[in-house]
Image (cartoon, rainbow, N blue to C red):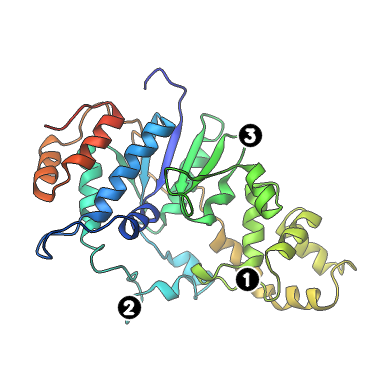
Amino acid sequence: MNDMTPRLMLLDSASLYFRAFYGVPDQRRSLDEPPTNAVRGFLDMIATLVTTHRPTHLVACWDNDWRPAFRVNAIPTYKTHRLSEGSLVQEESPEELTPQVPLIVDALRALGIARIGSDGYEADDVIGTLTHRARGAHPVDVVTGDRDLFQLVDDHAGVRVLYTARGGVRDPDVVTQTFLQTKYSVPTGQAYADLATLRGDASDGLPGVAGIGEKTAAALINRYGDLASLRRALADGDPQIKGAQRHRLEAASAYLDVAPVVVQVALDAPIPEFDASLPQEVGDLSLLSSLASGYGLTNPLNRVLSALGLGDND
């Protein structure tokens, strides 16, 4: 793979392993055995993605903080519905998924695949920052089931999203600016972020502007170019914004002041220098053997090793 044009692939790890948990059958013969369906599914996803798209660089991006303080301070309802009962910080997670996350961490380390998070930031922010750093240097594929990352799409910079929500990693929607125009009637990733701010997102606890749906939001962004210009036109008394629509936008002024802080992914999360290149050798052979034999992960680990060109794990 060293002779190939550089291509960076960024994995929205939690998005993928949650999908794996719900999509891969639990094949344990006894409940005394540790669950591994999310681990197996996640590893199979990596093998498929590397084989199909042939990245030269690969990063499993991590939520060091799934609900960062700067977003909660801006909009306190941010992701509140995902909190575990009685907790102000813990994300609700299926009981049989929780013990699999450390196994995924170990598997990535054993394989030598970079896993990167940033304290106080979400995986989305790590993805945004790494995409920003790569802009203009080489193409970037972002793999996620989360529409929030559509804002990074940039045809000129070679940034696209492989959106797994419908077809999984085997048949993802390839989100380019053409896709955004066709699906959402907006021309760019940034325009999508502005649309999402107006529309809101119940899955993230973002209320949006009451009475402004997706089509109206797109029409407003297209008319004024971006959210900031729309708000200036509103403040200047633009006669095209009238009646109920003016009232709704004015009533949402406080929300619109802070929502971009929540919706926009960070482009400057603190991330140490690291090597994102596909591993040229196994990261930790002893750990790899332990995971293979102790958790019955030989086959999925071997599939990743094969995809990476590292041969079988004996």
CB-based contact (under 8 Å), mark 3 and mark 2: no
- Residue 68 falls in image quadrant: bottom left
| Helix, strand or loop for disc 3 | loop
- Residue 92 falls in image quadrant: bottom left
Residue at which label 3 appears: 156
Q: Callout 2 environment at 10 Å: few (<14), some (14 to 19), or many (20+)?
A: few
The amino acid sitting under disc 2 is Ser
The answer for how far apart the CA atoms under marks 3 and 2 are is: 43 Å
Q: Callout 1 environment at 10 Å: few (<14), some (14 to 19), or many (20+)?
A: many
Q: Is residue 165 left or right of residue 108?
A: right
Residue 208 is marked as 1
Rendered position, 113 above or below 201: above
Residue 100 drawn at (x, y percent):
22, 57
Q: Callout 3 environment at 10 Å: few (<14), some (14 to 19), or many (20+)?
A: few
Residue 230 drawn at (x, y percent):
77, 61
- Residue 251 falls in image quadrant: bottom right
The amino acid sitting under disc 3 is His
